[in-house]
Image: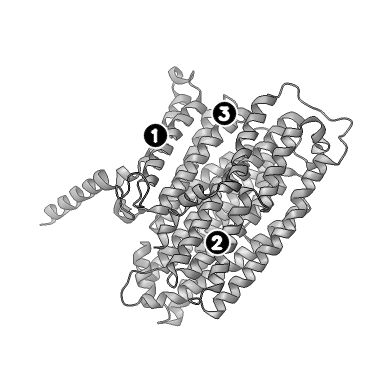
Amino acid sequence: MQPMELGSLVAGTIDDTLRVSLPLFRAEAALAATVVLVLLCRMLPVLRWLDSGLVALGGVAFAFWYAWCDATGLPLSGWPGADAVPGRQELFGGLLVFDALTAIIRLLLTGFLLLYIPFTKVSGIPDREDGADFYTLVLGAALGMCLMASANHLLMVFMAVEMASVPSYALAGMLKGRKASSEAALKYAVYGAGAAGVMLYGISLLAGVLGTCHLPSMAAELSRVVGADQGTTMVLVLGGLMVAVGLAFKLSAVPFHFWCPDVFEGAAAEVGAFLSVASKAAAVALVVRLAFGLGTLAAGPGGEGLADVRFFMLVVVALMAAATCTLGNLAAYGQTNMKRMLAYSTIAHAGYLMMGVAAAVAMMGVAPGQARDAVSALAFYLGTYLFMNLAAFAIVAVLRNRLRSEEISAYAGLVRSSPGLVVATAVVLVSLIGLPPLAGFVGKFLVFSSLAQAISSGAASPAVRSLLLALLVVGGVNTVISLFYYLRVLKVMTFDPPPADRFIDANAPVWLSGGLVAALALPIVVLGVFWSGLYAFAQLAGRIAS
């Protein structure tokens, strides 16, 4: 009997892999194949004439196409291919899951790479010699980020976070011969290793108490054991907080943000763009995945026991969101280096994103429609944040190439010599503040609106409403604080006199770099006015709350 049972198990696994899992894993498979091809371009002399950047761009185009097909094939009336793909499908024996959130985040990540690779080609980092190494690391980290968005098992959560983190450590030190770059990579690696160890220990505690690492199974066990025994509950709380350490590290959330300013300042602006956009999108998706995976339970006995779990998650996320947003904005005010200021800006925006997560956690299980709106707002925010931060770092890279400096004081009087670049900078920074009529305003408005809906909902308890009200006030106050340091950059560019000894590299490709910045800034303006199309697409991600 045993050989027959083993044979049946193997045959069933192979059939499930080939028939169900691989067709929904095409985007990740395309990224993995591209990594191999780029490595071959480095290893085989016959392929060294190929441009590794163009090879990477071609592979990413295939991944984006597969991600687009999967996203538009979700069962939603009015979209092409409706009902062609199941709304939720576990892959590879439950390690991963394909659903609306997976499809949208995968599409955002591959779309970001389609913009990011041309940006690096125009900015000149990496050069041709290091191109294969650079794009291998970028695509490897992006593959890990796609897995973060679809993780359905705690061991896969850990593996995905490490797959995204380890290449990032090397990327931070890509600038050879620069002490600051090497120091940034070392700090990032040491801090990441510590966070990974704490996270893995937390996973072991949760798995030991619950007897499983499969998220839906863990939710069922949580509803049974929470509150039954005080000692067990304390172990679960400790394990949950340790897992939160790893997630906070990827989000650069307070108090695990210390690596972020030093890494962004020491690394190239191109690396900062990748870490600030792709890493944030994947980390937010993973937080939402864990929150909904552990905080919801299908209809059945015991589902009520998860109310305490949801409240615990809400308190942790809300406190971290308030602290992250406030510290990021206050610390950014005193910065003199543009990349360091954008690092603290990234921290602050992580706080705004976590506010949307808090609204979704507060409403899941009590008002699914409002939880769905909160997740949709997060997806929209990430879509606009992609253009805002990539454009911000593109401007830093362009000015670095022209002025040979990344200090804010070096930008003095740029309006006289580069008025178009100053206008683009104004669009990006005002959108990062969240002022109309730009895309950043719509994204922040939707997140704050989800908080307001949760506060006014009769389904939420008074304690939850009070917590969310305080969070909404913190978000509004921090938006006002952010005015000062963003507008200070524009003040230096427009009102300060240019330095007499300013160096301008006449060989820098002005038209090419200017076209890149314009191409990234234009969607910020367009999405601020015509945002309904992107929001309709972002609503797909909200189906995870259904």
- Upstream in the sequence, badge 1 or badge 2? 1
Provide the residue designation for mark 3: 130
Tag 2: amino acid: Gly
SS at mark 2 in the image: helix
Provide the residue designation for mark 2: 356
The answer to whether 424 appears left or right of 22 in the picture is right
Q: Residues within 10 Å of mark 1 (few under 14, many from 20)?
A: some
Which mark lies nearer to you, 3 or 1?
A: 1
- Upstream in the sequence, badge 3 or badge 1? 1
Residue at image location 48% in from the left, 69% down from the top: 363
The answer to whether 390 appears left or right of 246 in the picture is right
Quote the CA–CA distance across marks 3 and 1.
20 Å
- Upstream in the sequence, badge 2 or badge 3? 3
Q: Residue 506: image x %, image y %?
A: 75, 22
Q: Residues within 10 Å of mark 2 (few under 14, many from 20)?
A: many
Residue at image location 36% in from the left, 75% down from the top: 303
SS at mark 1 in the image: helix
SS at mark 3 in the image: loop
Residue 212 appears in the picture as rendered: no
Q: Are marks 1 and 2 in contact (CB under 8 Å)?
A: no
Q: Residue 78: image x %, image y %?
A: 37, 49
Tag 1: amino acid: Ala
Q: Residue 286: image x %, image y %?
A: 47, 56
Q: Residue 60: image x %, image y %?
A: 45, 35
Provide the residue designation for mark 1: 33
User: Dividing the image into 4 quarters, which one contains the N terminus?
Assistant: bottom left
**In the depicted view, which residue is nearer to us: 437 or 288?**
437
Rendering colour mode: one colour
**In the depicted view, which residue is nearer to us: 530 or 462?**
530
Residue 520 appears in the picture as rendered: yes
Residue at image location 59% in from the left, 51% down from the top: 190
